[in-house]
Amino acid sequence: LVVVVISIVIVGFMESIAIAKQLATKNNYEIDASTEFLGLGMANLTAGLFSGYPVTGSFSRSAVNNDAGAKSGISAVVTATVVGLVLLFLTPIFELLSLPTLASIVISGVVSLVDYEEAIYLWKVHKFDFGVWMFAFLGTLFLGVELGLSLAVGLSLFLVVFESAYPHTAVLGRLPGTTEYRNVKNYPQAECYDSIVAVRIDAPIYFANTQQVREKVSKYVCKAKKELADSGREDQAVQFIILELNAVPHIDTSGLHTLQDMNTDYTNRKIQLCLTNPNNKVMERLVNSGLVEDIGRDHIFVSTHDAVHYCLSEMVIKENSQHSNNMNSPADRFPLALGEPENGGLMDDDDRRLPMTSSDFSEGRDVEAGNVVF
C-alpha cells in the first residue's frame, strides 16, 4: 500500500494547494503551503483514527463555497451541518434530481476559476509556459482532477530536469573601459582576447549536465581556434580557459570528476584551466576533492577580471622570454589587456580581438594571482 498512499498524499496535496492558491489570488490574501500541508496531515490523522476516508481540499466544492460568499472556515462547519440535515430529513426531496442538474451547480462554481487572462498573458509572454498551462487545464478537464494534476506535476518535473540537463553557458568579453565581463552575444562590443577563452556557467554542475558543460567548453575552445586561424594568426593557440563559477550554487562528485578530467585533458594540450569566484560550498568541495591542488591555487581568482589580468601577464612574460632578442614588443602578438583599442574605436562584429602593448598593464587595478581565501 506504500505506493497507493504516496500517490494519495501527492495528488491530494497538489489538488488542495492548487485551489488554495487560486482562491488566495482571487481574494487577495496569502497562504502558507507548509501550514496547509500540516492541516491536511492533522485532518487525515484524525480521519484515520475513526476509519474515515482520506481528506483533501475539494476543487469543485471550494469553488462553489467561494462563489456562495464564504469568508472563513466557519462556512465548512455550516456546510457540513446542512449536508447532514439534508441527508437525514430531506433526502426524498432531492432524490429525483437528475445528474445534469447537480453537475450544473458544480460547473457554475468552477467556471469562475478558469483564469482566461492568465492564459492570454502566458501566450503573449512565453508560449512554452502556455503549452504547459493548456496541458494541465485539458488534463484536469477531461481526465479528472487527480489524473490531470498528476500529469501536470510530471510534466513540470520533466521540464526542470530538462532545463538543468542543458544549462545556459556564455562566452564572456570585457566591456570597453570597464572591468566587467558580459555575454558577448548580448554585448557585441565586448572585447575578447587572443589565446584566452572565458566561459560563465549558469547552473549547478551535477551528474545530469556534466557532459553538456564539457562539450560546450570544448566547442568554445574550437571556435576560438577557428577565429584565430581565420584572422591569419594560425601560429597562436588557446593558452588559458577561464571558468566563471559565481552562478554555480552546487557541484556534485560527477561535476568534480568532470572538472578533473577537463583539467588533465587541457594540461596535456598545454592549456591552463582557471576558476573564478566559486561560492563557499563549491570551494569547499574543490578543496576536499584535491582539485584545487591539481589546478593550482594561483589559478583560482576572486573575479574574471583578475584571472584575465593574470593570464595576459603570463602571456607577456612568456613572449618576452622567448623573443627578447628579436622582438621589441609583443604588440602584434596579444590582445589589449586593460586599456582601450589602439585606434580608439570598437571592434568589428566578426573580430573582437585587439592588439595589446605591455604598457597597458599599468592601467586598472593591480591584482595578485590566486587571491581566493582558502
Image (spheres, helix red, strand yellow):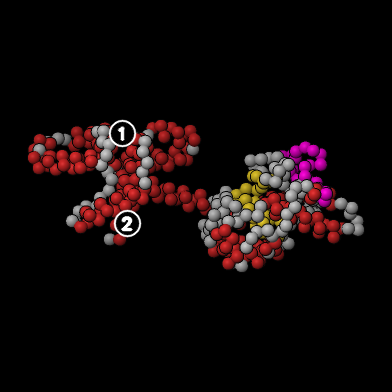
Q: Position of residue 170 (x, y in %)?
A: 62, 48
Position of 244 with respect to 327 (left or right) is left
Numbered mark located on residue 297 in the image: none
Considering the whole magenta stretch, tell me its main secondary structure.
loop
- Badge 2 is on which residue? 6
- Which residue shows up at 52% across the image and 57% down it? 208
Residue 125 colored in magenta in the image: no
Residue type, label 1: Val
Query: Residue at 23% of width from left, 39% of height from top?
Result: 75
Q: Quadrant of the C terminus?
A: bottom right
What is the quadrant of the N terminus in the image? bottom left
In percent of the image, x 33 and y 42: which residue is there? 20
User: In terms of depth relative to the viewer, which is nearer, 101 or 372?
Assistant: 372
Which residue is situated farthest in the right direction here?
Answer: 325
How far from the left and from the top, in percent, is residue 370? Answer: 69, 60
Find residue 65 and report its horizontal and vertical position in percent: 25, 37
**Contact between labelled residues 1 and 2, with CB atoms less than 8 Å apart:** no
How far apart marks 2 and 1 lie (CA) works out to 30 Å
The residue type indicated by label 2 comes to Ile
Helix, strand or loop for disc 1: helix
Q: Residues within 10 Å of mark 1 (few under 14, many from 20)?
A: few
Image quadrant where residue 18 sits: top left
Q: Which residue is labeled 1 in the image?
A: 111
**Residue extent of the magenta highlight:** 339-359
Secondary structure under tag 2 reads helix
Tell me: 244 left or right of 155: right
- Above or below, comparing residue 256 to residue 69 in the picture: below
Q: Residue 271, percent across and down?
A: 71, 60
Q: Judge whether residue 107 can be spotted in this image.
A: no
For label 2, the crowd category at 10 Å Cα-Cα, with few meaning under 14, some 14 to 19 and many 20 or more, is few
Q: Is residue 302 visible?
A: yes
Pointer 2 or 1: first along the chain? 2
